[in-house]
Amino acid sequence: MLNTEFQKIPASYLFSDIAKKVSEYQKAHPDKQVLRLGIGDVTLPLAPAVVAALHDAVEEQAQSATFAGYGPEQGYAFLREAIAEGEYEAIGVSLDSDEVFIGDGAKSDTGNIQELFAADAKVAVADPVYPVYIDSNAMAGRLGDYEGNRWTNLVYLPCNEGNGYKPPFPTEPVDLIYLCYPNNPTGTTLTRDELGGWVQYARDNGAVILFDAAYRAFITDDSIPRSIYEIEGAEEVAIEFGSFSKTAGFTGLRCSWTVVPKALVIDGVSVNAMWNRRQATKFNGTPYIVQKAAAAIYSPEGQVQVQEAVDYYLRNAALIREALLGAGIEAVGGDNSPYVWFKCPGGMDSWAFFDFLLNNAQVVGTPGVGFGPAGEGQFRLSAFGSFETTQEAVARLTGLLPQLSA
Ligand code: MLT
C-alpha cells in the first residue's frame, strides 16, 4: 500500500512547475532571451578561497595518508566549530559545537525536521511561505485535506499589506511554528522585539519554533536579529537552520547547518539527542570536500570574498525594489533580503502575471500564490541574477506597465 497522503499534494513542486513552463516557452521561442529571476539560484561563481579549499581537499582524497571515507554523520568538528564561532559567537550567541549539525541543504533539513514531532502535532506557517515546510508535513499526514489551495488541518498565519507582511499569532493552539527571516518569499524582516514576541509566545504556549535563517547573510541593519538565539530563552523553544547556498554560492555544492540546542527538552526528552539519532540513521554526512570548502568561508579572505558576493546581490535587490517603487508598484523586501515582493500590476492574479511577464517580456519570476493562498495577486523577484540580467529584466518589466494601466 502507498502513502496516500502524497495523492493529496499538488502534483508538482512549485519550482518544478515553473521550470517546466519556462522550458516549454523557450522551446517554442528559441530566438527569445529569457531572463530568470524566479528560483533563488545564485549566479556568481564560488569564492576563490572556497575553490582553493576544494582543490586541497580533492588532493587529500588522492593520498592514502589523508583520504577521508565516511565522516561523522553530524559533520566534521572543524566545520561545526567554525560555524559556532563564525556565525554565533560573532554575534554574541554562545553555542556548543555539538549543538550544530551539518546537513546538505536547508531544504532537506527543514523538510526532515518534522519527523521528530508527533504525527498529530498541529503546524502553523506564515502565509505565504517556502513550500517545503508545508509539503513535508503534508507527506507525513499532518495537514488533513487539500481543498481550494488550503490544507484543512494547517494553521495559516496570513501576512499581507494590512499587517506589514508580519504573521499574526495563532488564534488556536499549535505545536510547531515555522518562521523564516529574512523572509522567503516576501523579503521582509522581524525586529528584535517582534521576534522576541514569538519566542515569548512559544514559551507561554508550549510550542516549538522552526526558524529558517537561510538568508541571514543579507541583513545589513544591525538592529535586525540574525539568529533567533539572540533572543533570550529561545534556546529552550527553537531550532534554527542556516545555509551556505545563498551566502556562499553553494546551491550546487550543498551544505547547511541545523542548530538543535541541548536546552530544548520536551517531556524530559532531548531533541538534540533525537536529531542526532535521526541523522546517524538516515544521513552519512555532507561530503568531506564540501565541508572543507564551507569552512574556508570563515578564513579572513573567505569572509571578504563572500561579503562581496552578498553585496553584489543586495545591489540587484535594491535595483529591483527602487525600480518597482519608482514605477508606483507597492513593493516590499529587497533591503536586508535578496527577494522583492509586490502586488501584480493591473490587479492580475499571480499566474496570469507570470504568463504575461514571460510572454511579453521574457522575464521569469515566481507567482506569489505558489507560496500559499495569501500570496494570490502577488509576485516575487529574486536578486540572484547577474547585475546586467537584473537591469534588463527590470527595464522590460517597467516598460510593460503602461500597457497594464491602459
Ligand atoms: C527559492 O527560490 O525560494 C529558493 O531558492 C528555493 C530553495 O532554496 O530551495
Image (spheres, rainbow, N blue to C red):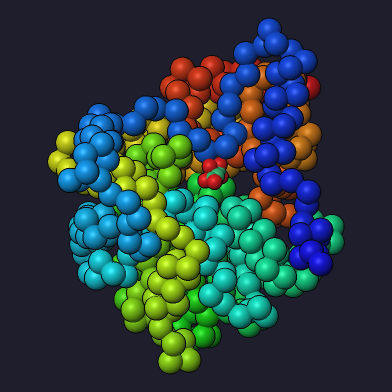
> Which residue is drawn at the image coordinates 68% and 7% (left, top)?
31
User: Can residue 60 be seen in this snapshot?
Assistant: no
Of residues 222 and 232, the one nearer the viewer is 232
Numbered label tally: 0
Residue 43 in the image, given as x and y percentages of width and height = 44, 28
Of residues 10 and 58, the one nearer the viewer is 58
* Depicted 211 relative to depicted 248: above or below: below
> Which residue is drawn at the image coordinates 39% and 78% (left, top)?
273
Residue 350 in the image, given as x and y percentages of width and height = 73, 40
Residue 189 in the image, given as x and y percentages of width and height = 45, 54
For this orientation, the residue located farthest to the top is: 31
Indicate the quadrant where residue 39 lies: top right
Residue 404 in the image, given as x and y percentages of width and height = 75, 25
Q: Quadrant of the C terminus?
A: top right
Indicate the quadrant where residue 307 lies: top left
Indicate the quadrant where residue 220 lies: top left
> Which residue is drawn at the image coordinates 45% and 37% (left, top)?
252
> Which residue is drawn at the image coordinates 57% and 77% (left, top)?
117
For this orientation, the residue located farthest to the bottom is: 268
For this orientation, the residue located farthest to the front is: 64
Quarter of the picture for ligand 1?
A: top right
Q: Does residue 341 appear left or right of residue 298 in this picture?
A: right
For this orientation, the residue located farthest to the right is: 147
User: Can residue 103 be seen in this snapshot?
Assistant: yes
Q: Does residue 73 appear left or right of residue 339 in this picture?
A: left
* Depicted 118 relative to depicted 62: above or below: below
Q: Does residue 41 appear left or right of residue 157 in this picture?
A: left
* Depicted 129 relative to depicted 64: above or below: below
Q: Quadrant of the N terminus?
A: bottom right
Of residues 297 and 291, the one nearer the viewer is 291
